[in-house]
Image (cartoon, rainbow, N blue to C red):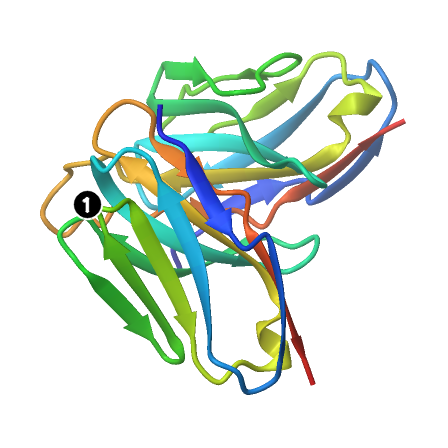
Amino acid sequence: EAQVTQNPRYLITVTGKKLTVTCSQNMNHEYMSWYRQDPGLGLRQIYYSMNVEVTDKGDVPEGYKVSRKEKRNFPLILESPSPNQTSLYFCASSLERGQGTRNTGELFFGEGSRLTVL
Amino acid sequence: KQEVTQIPAALSVPEGENLVLNCSFTDSAIYNLQWFRQDPGKGLTSLLLIQSSQREQTSGRLNASLDKSSGRSTLYIAASQPGDSATYLCAVRGNYGQNFVFGPGTRLSVLP
């Protein structure tokens, strides 16, 4: 089954304790992205990756790091979490544009990770 | 830079009504447009995807149309049901540069 898997789904942590949210996709997608969603602010992009070893900042990258060492994985790292990073996080992936005539470029989402930083 | 807006921001209708949700975008050089549904606190479920060469897509009671020249897409929901209550988001993927740009969503309530 084609899917994007995030872990953990729920996490409560304390300020300053480093954490990693993992994201893995089994569709051989080039493009992967992280979003956060907060009430009234909609979906905001944190970082994205166009392929292995290629990452770029989104709209709200401060306080986050990412890496793309393998095509299937795109972990989100919070080196020193703060309460303002309490949010619902989503990972998403897609084939890059132009990869064959059957490529619709559909974006697939993980189920989300709810993070609370105390 | 692509900007995506959705009107209305919120909509409340009685069960059984047909309704239209709107999505507008500023740059017509798009690769595709995708409609999603999101229940409160849950993930995003893909409803329909329209590629740039297409005019519409249908799935059950849902029909999405695309007019690139005017920068608009509409999501038509026929015979609405309370189970349709959710937030509906549209996302535009550009032909180049920035990939996916999301609208703020329309929060739909269908009253029994």
Identify residue type, mark 1.
Ser
Camera-nearest residue between B43 and B67? B67
Kindly tell me whether residue A26 is visible in this rendering.
no
Q: Please report the residue visible at 72 percent of the width from the left and 34 percent of the height from the top.
A: A87
- Reading the image, the residue beneath label 1 is B69
Question: What subunit carries mark 1?
Answer: B
Q: Residues within 10 Å of mark 1 (few under 14, many from 20)?
A: few
Could you say where residue B90 lies in the image, as x and y percent from the top left?
A: 43, 50
Tell me the quadrant of the picture where the C terminus of chain A can be found: top right
Residue at point 65%, 55% (across, down): B42
Residue A23, x across and y down, in percent:
53, 36
Q: In this view, does A33 lie to the left or right of A90?
A: left
Q: How many labels does the image show?
A: 1
Would residue B24 be seen by someone viewing this image from the given angle? yes
From the top left corner, tell me how far across and down residue A69 is, in percent.
41, 19
Front residue of A17/A104: it is A104
> Vertically, is B79 above or below A98?
below
Give the quadrant of residue A49: top left
- Judging depth in this view, the residue of A31 and B49 nearest the camera is B49
Q: Residue at x 54, y 26 (%)?
A: A75
Residue B104, above or below B96: below
Image coords of residue A111 (percent x, y): 58, 50
Residue at position x 57%, y 73% in the image: B84
- Left or right, B101 with respect to B26, comes to right
